[in-house]
Image (tube, rainbow, N blue to C red):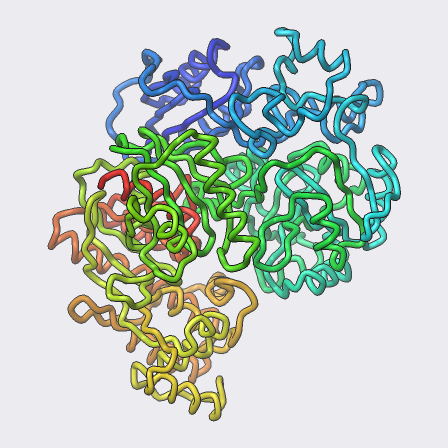
Amino acid sequence: MRVKINITGTIQGVGFRPFIYNLATSLNLKGYVLNNPSGVVIEAEGNNEKIREFLIKIDKEKPPISRIYSLEYKFLEDIGHQNFEIRKSNEHGEKKALILPDLATCKECISEVENPNDRRYLYPFTNCTNCGPRFTIIEKLPYDRKNTTMKIFRMCSLCKDEYNNPKNRRFHAQPNACSQCGPYITLTDNKGNEISKKEKALKEAAKFLDNGKILAIKGLGGFHLICDATNEESVKLLRKRKNREEKPFAVMFENIDSVKQLASVSLLEERALTSVEKPIVILEKNENYNLAKSVAPENSTIGAFLPYTPLHYLILKLFKKPIVATSANVTDNPIIKDNREAIKKLNSIADYFLTHNRPIKRRCDDSVIRIITKKPSPIRRSRGFAPLPVTLPFKLKRQVLALGPFMKNTIAVGIDDKVFISQHIGELETPLSIEFYEETVKDFLTLFDINPEIVVCDKHPGYYSTKYGKRHYKDKLIKVQHHYTHLLSCLAENEIEPDKEVIGFAFDGTGYGDDKTIWGGEVFILDYQKYERVFHLKAFPLPGGEKAVKEPYRVAFSLCHTGNIKSNSTFIGKEKEKFLKQMIEKEINSPLSSSMGRLFDGICALIGIRDTVSYHAQGAILLEQAAIKGETEEIYNFKISGKEIDWTPLIENILKDKKIGIPNSLIARKFHNTVAHLILKIAKKLRNERKTNRVALSGGVFQNRLITEKAIQLLKNEEFVVYTHQIVPANDGGISLGQIVAGGFR
């Protein structure tokens, strides 16, 4: 195994490279460490477990004077390093000041906040050069206080002395402040009437939580809605008020030990939880799990994270129990960041508001990751990571702007060999989300001082991002197919050479195909310049179009009708069956789809798990949850005819199993096994025909842990080289990276 690590921080001139050298050689790893204009780059090759031990020890054993601001890593193919060396610094590339992401509060600042004898005792905005807000407060470069939202606070003499002292850890800490001169918190009711301020507000907020109340609390990149995660009535009330029926809530815990009491935590999951990024990490619940049932209903996992600001830390310290902490927004709108906006739009959800007077320049949601096959698999790359660059294995020919897709939108700018990806924007379907999107495009062009020569968008003519591109960049615009950009992002982050062909599986819910149907179960042969669609799922209609996504029973019926399969129609009823049949046969709002994501939905409904869903991908998630409980290596049949993957035998056999009483857990597991074996079968066929053993997996389906781990295991057993996402999400949040790559090769 080879790991490549990019680190930014106070890591040059502090003995960091010798530390890495000694650590690597003690673990018998080969590779190198070098300084570059952005920080430090490390490559280490060796035994899998030693590599993971190396990753964990970098955080825990680094030189005391060093500080890590960001650490992103990815696993790559072995290239045969012979020894470990400290290489000469790489001075190539423009020495451009990086805009750092927001950094979680460091241990030194937390110890001050906890110390009654310290002048920053209980101060919720304590920070230093090594931690605190960055991306969410900077207005323009250079990163000086006058160019941040902290410019309205004049430092007191003590803070100014720290700021000007090179030996102080607050030397040039732009957000530096204390209770005498900096921002402060205010507790109000849901009409904005002040109740208390500062320390008193903290203590009263904790009491309100204990009394089952719902609070809106202003953090780094926007507001959270919080409540007692152990109080079923409070959590149910939050669901009702927010109109969020079943989608799991994230839970913030006081410390890593409290997480371990309720969830299984591997070493890499612990590393992610305690890292400077402090993302939400998807964990398996353990036998001691005892939070409110409504936190994550029908789910064996929980999204857990640790406090990343002193304010969150103090609330949890005073409250002494885990809290639900979910983004404060109205359905389908972006996270709310301003005090007045929060009170106006959240007063029917929150009982009380804990606000502060430090302005937030840009919204930034929490990041989410899952560890799959002992590697990071981002679900959402935002706070803590954005806008750190992704380094490409080649240089772009021109400056490129990527406008992203429709769902889980991010935008990106590409300069030289760097791609700067925005924070999570989300679905572009409301006026406020569109406003946020347009703000972000203009913001990134200004921040990185570029005038793009090429602009890339999705081929879908109805996406707002595509329409925006046509309106503003008609002469520079390139339209690129959705699933091709999925796979390009995977190739780029895995540093595949430009001349190498790869077998690419792009499995997701939707994407505009070259034949103007909805794709999503696609197999390509591709490189950075071209692609060929070599296999795809047999297409089936989606009666009602977008409605079929929210009502998977429509997909279940369509699969049976299209495959000419007799089924017991009790799962939809005679009237609905007649209605759907007419829609399909008369081609009324029934677009054709080859989507693997929709196949998951249809099977979920077909076997009676769920006819309708309340959030995106719920059908697929519930099918995975059922499969986790089933233990079998059996598979169903798929038929491959020409370029078409015919799912008809699969549906027939699922219905037979259902009829004879086979449990849903076993049916779901057999289906998951089948998809993994299908990937292997097609990969072997293409290896024989196209002489390539490289396989890339991209698209939202590969956030499914069972599918991904099984497919990787099968492929590696047959000596395939497998590439998955480790830096950007496999879902649509990673598409902007692929769009940059496509534009850079035109």
In the rendered view, would you say 426 is above or below 198? below
Quadrant assignment for the N terminus: top left
- Say left or right for 508 vs 265: left
Residue 597 in which image quadrant: bottom left
Q: Is residue 63 visible?
A: yes
Identify which residue is drawn at 59% across, 24% down.
147
**Where is residue 431 drawn, in percent x and y?**
55, 56
**Where is residue 730 drawn, in percent x and y?**
40, 49
In the rendered view, would you say 89 is above or below 410? above
Quadrant assignment for the C terminus: top left
Residue 197 in which image quadrant: top right
Identify which residue is drawn at 34% across, 14% down.
91
**Where is residue 239 drawn, in percent x and y?**
68, 62
Residue nearest the viewer, comparing 306 with 390: 390
Identify which residue is drawn at 41% across, 68% down.
600
Q: Is residue 52 visible?
A: no
- Say left or right for 523 vs 615: left
Identify which residue is drawn at 72% across, 24% down.
153
